[in-house]
C-alpha cells in the first residue's frame, strides 16, 4: 500500500467533504432520526459506493486518456460548474 497516496487522498477528500451538501444532508438526517447508527451507516455506505464508482471509472478512463488530460478536464469541469452555480444560483 502506498501510504503517501493514501494520506493525500484522505486529506483531500476529508477537506472537500467538510461543509458540502452531503455532510449537511447527513446532519439533517441525524437531527431528525432516532437511529443515528442507521444514518451513519447509510451515509458511509453511499460515500464508499460513490468512491468505488469514481475509482473504477477513473481506472477505465486512464486506459484511454493520459492522466494529465484527466486532471486538466477535471479542473476545467470544476471551474465551469462553479461558474454555473454562481450565475444560476436560483435567485
Image (cartoon, helix red, strand yellow):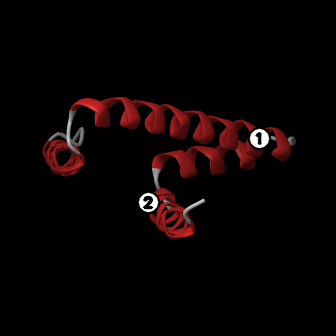
Percent x, y for residue 17? 49, 56
The number of numbered discs placed on residues in the rendered structure image is 2
Q: Nearer the viewer, residue 89 or 58?
A: 58
Q: Residue at x 47, y 47 (%)?
A: 21
- Please say if the residues under marks 2 and 1 sit with CB atoms less than 8 Å apart: no
Q: Nearer the viewer, residue 90 or 49?
A: 49
How crowded is the residue under tag 2: few (<14 C-alpha within 10 Å), some, or many (20+)?
A: few
Percent x, y for residue 65? 20, 36
Q: Which residue is mark 1?
A: 41
Percent x, y for residue 48? 62, 40
Left/right of residue 38 with respect to residue 18 in the rendered view: right
Q: Which residue is mark 2?
A: 16
- Examine the rendered structure and indicate whether residue 89 appears above or below residue 27: above
Helix or strand or loop: what does disc 2 sit on?
helix
Percent x, y for residue 38? 81, 38
Q: Residue 57 appears in which quarter of the rendering?
A: top left
- Examine the rendered structure and indicate whether residue 29 appears above or below residue 14: above
- Examine the rendered structure and indicate whether residue 17 appears above or below residue 11: above
Left/right of residue 60 with respect to residue 77 in the rendered view: right
Mark 2–mark 1 distance (CA, rounded to whole Å)? 20 Å
How crowded is the residue under tag 1: few (<14 C-alpha within 10 Å), some, or many (20+)?
A: few
Left/right of residue 25 with respect to residue 32 in the rendered view: left
Amino acid at each position: 500500500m502506498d501510504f503517501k497516496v493514501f494520506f493525500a487522498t484522505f486529506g483531500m477528500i476529508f477537506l472537500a467533504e467538510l461543509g458540502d451538501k452531503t455532510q449537511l444532508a447527513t446532519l439533517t438526517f441525524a437531527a431528525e432520526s432516532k437511529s443515528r447508527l442507521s444514518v451513519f451507516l447509510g451515509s458511509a455506505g453511499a460515500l464508499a459506493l460513490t468512491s468505488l464508482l469514481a475509482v473504477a471509472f477513473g481506472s477505465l478512463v486512464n486506459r484511454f486518456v493520459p492522466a494529465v488530460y484527466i486532471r486538466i478536464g477535471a479542473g476545467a469541469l470544476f471551474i465551469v460548474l462553479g461558474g454555473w452555480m454562481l450565475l444560476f444560483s436560483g435567485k
